[in-house]
C-alpha cells in the first residue's frame, strides 16, 4: 500500500475501502503511526485511545465486508477538538481545570458521526476554552505549524488544523466562535467551514460564547469538508438554537454543480494592514472567478470598524457566564488547599484557569456589571444587529463575498503572545461572520515567499453552505493546492 496513504482524501479512501484494496484498520494504523512519528514535534494531540479507535475500524471493516456500509465516511478517521464530548473519553478544553474529567455522554455531532461509521480518532489540542488565535494558550503545550515548526498553527482549533495538514488524521472537527476554524485552516493550508449559526447542533460542545459558537469540519479538500458537514448538520431537539436545515441542498451533487454567481468584494477588508503577498494572491483568486464567468463587484460593509470591539464585549460577557460552572465542585480539577466552600471556588479557579481565560472572565464580568451593562453590553448587542443588517443589505445585490482570512501568514511562536491586542487583531476578517450569523469557508490559494500557506474566505448568506462550498470547489478543481503538503 502507498506509503502516504494518510494524505489521501476521504473520497479516494472511500473508493479504496469499497474495492477491498484497503481496510479501515490499515488506514487507521497508518494515521496512528504517522502521529506517533511526528507528533512530538507538533503536539497536535492532547490524548488518544488507540485500542478504542482500532476497534471502531474493525467494526467498520466488518460492515464494508457484509455490504452494510453506513456512509461514504464509514471507516475514515476523524480527529476531535478537545471541547466536544465523546462518551468515555477525557475532555480538557486545553485547560488544567478539566483535568481528570471524562465525558459521560456523546455530543450530537459525535452521535451522527457514529451513525455514519466514522472512526473517532484522538482528542485535538486547542487554546484553553477556545480563547486564542495561536494555540499558545493550551495547558497541554503549544502546537507547532507543520509548515514551519517555529510558527503557530493558528487557533483556537490549531491542533485540528496541524493534524489534518500533516496527515495525522484525514478529517477533524473544530469549533469557531470568531475565526477558530478558518484562521488555523488558512495558516496550515487546509479547508475549514464555519457553518451558519444553527446549522450544526451545539449539544455536547463546551460553550465559550453561546450566541457565536459553531462546530465545523476541517479537511484537505472541499469535497471532504462538504461530506463531513453533511453528516453533522441538521436540526437537533437537544439544541434549541438549531435549525431545520434542508440537507438535500448541500449534497455533493449540489456542491459540484457550478452556477454563475455575483461575488462581492468588500473594500474594508482590503485596506491597511493586509500583507501585500496575501492581497496579491487573493486578487489572483478573484481574477480566476472573473475569467470563469462570475460577476464581481466592489461592495462596502460600513460597520466593519466596530466588529472587533463588539466581539470582545459579547464574547467575553457570554464566556464569563458560561465559565461560572467550573468551580471545583462538579467537574475536573479541585484545589486541595481550600479551607471552606468559598475558598474552594477561589482557589480552584485561580489555579485551574490560565491567564487569557482569566482576562476574558474579568472583561466579561466588567461589561455585565450593573453600572456598565447598558453602556457596553446592551450597546454592543445593538451594534451587532447593525453589523448583521450591513451584511444583509449587501447580500441583496451579491450572492457571496470574498475576503482574506488573516492579515498575515502564520506568525512566529511568541511573536504576539505578550500583546493581547495584536493577537486579537489576527481575527479581524473572521469575527464579523459569527456576529452576523453567516457561513464561511476558508480555503488555500497559494504559498508566500517563505513557503507559508495563504487562504481566502468565501462568505455566504445564512444556510447557504452549498453555495460557499460550490464556489470553493470550483476554485479547488482548477488548482492543485489540495495536493500540497508540508515537508514535516
Ligand atoms: N481568536 C478568537 C478569540 O480568541 C476566536 C476564537 C474562536 O473562534 N474560538 O476569541
Image: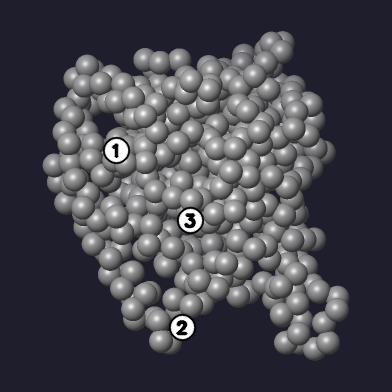
Residue 457 or 293: which is nearer the viewer? Answer: 457
Horizontal side, residue 101 vs residue 145: left or right: right
Percent position of residue 162, x then y: 62, 34
Q: Residues within 10 Å of mark 3 (few under 14, many from 20)?
A: few
- Can residue 56 be seen by looking at this rendering? no
Is residue 346 left or right of 217 when viewed as pictured?
right
Q: Position of residue 8 (x, y in %)?
A: 59, 19
Q: Work out whether 435 lies above or below 286.
A: below
Where does label 1 land, which residue?
270
Query: Mark 2 and mark 1: span between their CA atoms?
Result: 37 Å
Q: Along the line of sight, which residue is nearer the eye, 413 or 377?
A: 413
Q: Which mark is residue 421?
A: 3
- In the image, 70 versus 192, the foreground residue is 192
Q: Which residue is farthest right?
A: 336
Q: Earlier in the sequence, mark 3 or mark 1?
A: 1
Label 2: state its secondary structure.
loop
- The CA span between labels 3 and 1 is 20 Å
Q: Is residue 348 above or below residue 403?
A: below
- Look at the numbered disc 2 and say if its residue's Cβ is closer than 8 Å to ligand 1: no
Amino acid at each position: 500500500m502507498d506509503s502516504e496513504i494518510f494524505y489521501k482524501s476521504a473520497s479516494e479512501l472511500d473508493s479504496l475501502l469499497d474495492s477491498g484494496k484497503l481496510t479501515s484498520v490499515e488506514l487507521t494504523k497508518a494515521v496512528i503511526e504517522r502521529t506517533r512519528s511526528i507528533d512530538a514535534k507538533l503536539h497536535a494531540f492532547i490524548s488518544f485511545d488507540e485500542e478504542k479507535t482500532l476497534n471502531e475500524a474493525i467494526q467498520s471493516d466488518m460492515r464494508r465486508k457484509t455490504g452494510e456500509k453506513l456512509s461514504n465516511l464509514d471507516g475514515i478517521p476523524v480527529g476531535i477538538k478537545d471541547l466536544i464530548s465523546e462518551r468515555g473519553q477525557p475532555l480538557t478544553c486545553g485547560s488544567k481545570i478539566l483535568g481528570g474529567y471524562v465525558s459521560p455522554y456523546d455530543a450530537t455531532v459525535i452521535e451522527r458521526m457514529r451513525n455514519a461509521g466514522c472512526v473517532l480518532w484522538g482528542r485535538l489540542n486547542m487554546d484553553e476554552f477556545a480563547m486564542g488565535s495561536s494555540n499558545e494558550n493550551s495547558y497541554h503545550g503549544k502546537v507547532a505549524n507543520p509548515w514551519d515548526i517555529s510558527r503557530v498553527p493558528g487557533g483556537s482549533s490549531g491542533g485540528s488544523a496541524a493534524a489534518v495538514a500533516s496527515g495525522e488524521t484525514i478529517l477533524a472537527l473544530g469549533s469557531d466562535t470568531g475565526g477558530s476554524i478558518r484562521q488555523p485552516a488558512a495558516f496550515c493550508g487546509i479547508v475549514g467551514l464555519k457553518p451558519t449559526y444553527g446549522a450544526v447542533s451545539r449539544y455536547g460542545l463546551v460553550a465559550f460564547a453561546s450566541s457565536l459558537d459553531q462546530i465545523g469540519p476541517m479537511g484537505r479538500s472541499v469535497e471532504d469538508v462538504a461530506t463531513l458537514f453533511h453528516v453533522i448538520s441538521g436540526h437537533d431537539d437537544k439544541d434549541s438554537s438549531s435549525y431545520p436545515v434542508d440537507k438535500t441542498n448541500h449534497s455533493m451533487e449540489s456542491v459540484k454543480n457550478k452556477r454563475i454567481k455575483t461575488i462581492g468584494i468588500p473594500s474594508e477588508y482590503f485596506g491597511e494592514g493586509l500583507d501585500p503577498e496575501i492581497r496579491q494572491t487573493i486578487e489572483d483568486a478573484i481574477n480566476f472567478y472573473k475569467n470563469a464567468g462570475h460577476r464581481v463587484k466592489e461592495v462596502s460593509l460600513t460597520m466593519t470598524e466596530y466588529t472587533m470591539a463588539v466581539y470582545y464585549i459579547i464574547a467575553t460577557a457570554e464566556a464569563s457566564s458560561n465559565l461560572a460552572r467550573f468551580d471545583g465542585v462538579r467537574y475536573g480539577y479541585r484545589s486541595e488547599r481550600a479551607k471552606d466552600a468559598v475558598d474552594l471556588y477561589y482557589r480552584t479557579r485561580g489555579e485551574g484557569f490560565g491567564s487569557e481565560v482569566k482576562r476574558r472572565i474579568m472583561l466579561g464580568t466588567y461589561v455585565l456589571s450593573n453600572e456598565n451593562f447598558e453602556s457596553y453590553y446592551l450597546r454592543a448587542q445593538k451594534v451587532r444587529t447593525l453589523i448583521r443588517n450591513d451584511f444583509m443589505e449587501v447580500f441583496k445585490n451579491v450572492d457571496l463575498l470574498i475576503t482574506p482570512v488573516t492579515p498575515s501568514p502564520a506568525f512566529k511562536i511568541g511573536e504576539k503572545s505578550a500583546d493581547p491586542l495584536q493577537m486579537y487583531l489576527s481575527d479581524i476578517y473572521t469575527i464579523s461572520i459569527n456576529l452576523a450569523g453567516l457561513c464561511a469557508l476558508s480555503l488555500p490559494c497559494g504559498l508566500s515567499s517563505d513557503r507559508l500557506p495563504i487562504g481566502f474566505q468565501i462568505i455566504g448568506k445564512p444556510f447557504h453552505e452549498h453555495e460557499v462550498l460550490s464556489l470553493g470547489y470550483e476554485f479547488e478543481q482548477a488548482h492543485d493546492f489540495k495536493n500540497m503538503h508540508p515537508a514535516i
